[in-house]
Image (cartoon, rainbow, N blue to C red):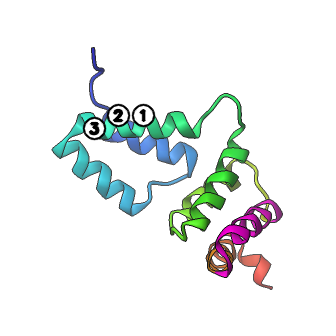
Amino acid sequence: MTKPPATLDDLEGRYRDMIGLVPPKIGKRLKLGLKVDPGIVTALEDWRIAALTPQALDQKTVQLMSFAILLVQTSEAAANHARAAIKAGATLQELHASAAIAALFRGVAAFNLAGEILSSLFPESDK
C-alpha cells in the first residue's frame, strides 16, 4: 500500500527545517512535480530526508559531508548545505576544513566555489 502524496507545505517545511528556507529552484521543482506526478515527488523527497537524517550521524556531520560532496561536483547546491551545516552548529573553520578536503579531490574549482559561498554566509570574514 502506498501512502498519499505529501502536501507542498509539508515538503517545503522539510527544507525550512533543515536549511532555513526553500531555495527557489527547489520550490519550483516541488510545485511542478506535485502537479505532474505527486507520488514520485513524495517518494523522492522521502528518500532525500531519510538519507539526510541517518541515526548514525548527527546533522552537523551530515551537512558538512553534503557540503564537501557538492563542492566536489562544483554544484551551487553546496550553498544550501553550508546553510544547513551552520544551522546545525558548524563553524566557518569546520566548513573551510570540509572545503579543503573537497579541494583535494576536485582542485581549486571546489575551493573557489567554497570561498564564494562562505564569504557570503560569513561576510565578517572578509574584513
Give me the C-alpha separation between circle 1 and circle 3: 10 Å
Looking at the image, do the residues carrying marks 1 and 3 touch, with CB atoms under 8 Å apart? Answer: no
Q: Secondary structure at mark 3?
A: helix
**Looking at the image, residue 88 lies above or below residue 125:** above
Quadrant position of the N terminus in the picture: top left
Looking at the image, do the residues carrying marks 2 and 3 touch, with CB atoms under 8 Å apart? Answer: yes
- Residue 40's disc number: 3
Q: Is residue 94 magenta?
A: yes
Residue that appears at 64% across and 75% down: 120
Q: Quadrant of residue 43?
A: top left
Q: Residues within 10 Å of mark 3 (few under 14, many from 20)?
A: few
Looking at the image, do the residues carrying marks 1 and 2 touch, with CB atoms under 8 Å apart? Answer: yes
Residue that appears at 27% across and 38% down: 40
Q: Is residue 82 magenta?
A: no
- Among all residues in the image, which is located at the extreme front? 105
**Looking at the image, residue 63 lies above or below residue 7:** below
**Label 3 amino acid?**
Ile
Q: Position of residue 18 (x, y in %)?
A: 57, 45
Q: Is residue 77 left or right of residue 37?
A: right
**Looking at the image, residue 127 lies above or below residue 110:** below
* Nearer-N-terminus badge (1/3): 3
Quadrant position of the C terminus in the picture: bottom right
Residue that appears at 67% across and 77% down: 107
Q: Secondary structure at mark 1?
A: helix
User: Magenta part of the protein: which range?
Assistant: 93-108
Would you name the residue on which mark 1 appears?
46
**Label 2 amino acid?**
Ala
Would you name the residue on which mark 2 appears?
43
